[in-house]
Image (tube, rainbow, N blue to C red):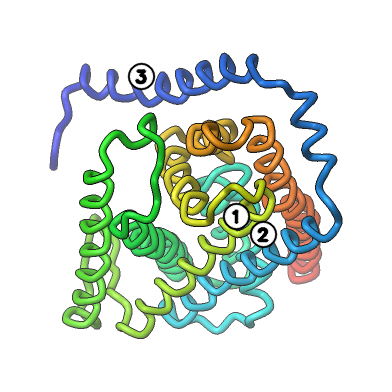
Amino acid sequence: MRYRHPLLHRLWRIALWLFPLAVLALLAQAARTIDWKHVAESMAGYDAGTLTVATLLMVASYLTYCGYDLAARHYAHHSLSTGRVMLITSIAYAFALNIGALIGGTGARFRMYSHAGLGIGTISRIVAFSAATNWLGYLLLAGALFASGRVALPPRLVSDASVLEATGLVMVTATLLYVFACHRLHGRVFHVRGHHFRLPSVPLALTQFALAMVNWSLMTAIIFILLPPSADYPTVLGALLFAAVATALTHIPAGIGVIEAVFVAAFGHRIPPTQVLAALLAYRAIYFLAPLLLAGVAYFMLEVRGKAVASTSAG
């Protein structure tokens, strides 16, 4: 067992709290310089066609994300219906985006899957597979993009383009090693701290990459069509991928302010910050808030139905 010095442990915990607080303080300071009236005017300028396309892309993204848990059904070997899996996954995804992955996504999945009759071990494998799918696709997509040199983020985000390209090569290599490990070690059970897991088959691993890459690309497409024509897709994709890591590091729910700061830094030199913020606020309304409202209603109905079934069984 590895022991950590109590003082170092306490300092680490303090740092974990201070870092997001410092980020929020910097974001609050930057927010004072924004002309929010102009932001509102930019948001009001979107036409119905643009908002319709953005909404359709949102639906396509959520359906793609449901594929994570549908693929996990083969990995975890359970027999829940496709409709039930998709309902649980879409609710959990909306909660994860707005509340946080641990409480919103993982907690909701455990509760809803357990009510559906799955055991803790099976649910744990579903959650692990889904999370791995998301970040494996991220690694391959971001790695390929950064290694290609097609994205040029500003110096305040990335100071050396060669470092970004080298990082991309490392990320792509990591994904290739994962596929190789799935080929060589599939079927072998690994035990880590009382938990056991196995690597998926190569076809299932490739499915993981495909699903996540499509999902990240659809999310990017929503922001891309909401930004002015001067925005290019590779830079939008790079900014979104960069913001995803920043959000994960800060532990700020929904990445509020973090995503905005990254995109303003990426596009502020060619697009007015007010238009960037308008696009991101519209993106949040379409991709975060609207699905959250629907997910909240659906979750409430599942809870009510679950309690009614429990009462009937008890009686």
Which corner quadrant holds the C terminus?
bottom right
Residue behind mark 1: 108
Q: Which residue is mark 3?
A: 14
Q: Amino acid at mark 1?
A: Ala
The residue depicted at 48 percent of the width and 78 percent of the height is 71
Residue 115 visible (yes or no): no
- The image shows residue 178 at horizontal and vertical percentages of 24, 70
Q: Are marks 3 and 2 in contact (CB under 8 Å)?
A: no
Residue 52: horizontal and vertical position, in percent?
80, 61
Amino acid type shown at disc 3: Ile
Residue 67 seen in the current view: yes
Determine whether label 2 and label 1 are within 8 Å by CB: yes
Relative height, residue 147 to residue 22 (above, below) = below
Callout 2, which amino acid?
Answer: Ile
User: The N terminus appears in which quarter of the rendering?
Assistant: top left
Residue at screen point 60% across, 42% down: 99
Q: Between marks 3 and 2, how big is the CA–CA gap?
A: 33 Å
| CA–CA distance in space, label 3 to label 1 | 28 Å
Identify the residue at image location x=37%, y=78%. 206
Residue named by callout 2: 91
Q: Is residue 181 left or right of residue 133?
A: left
Mark 2 burial class by Cα count in 10 Å: few <14, some 14-19, many 20+? many
Would residue 240 be found to the left or right of residue 161 on screen? right
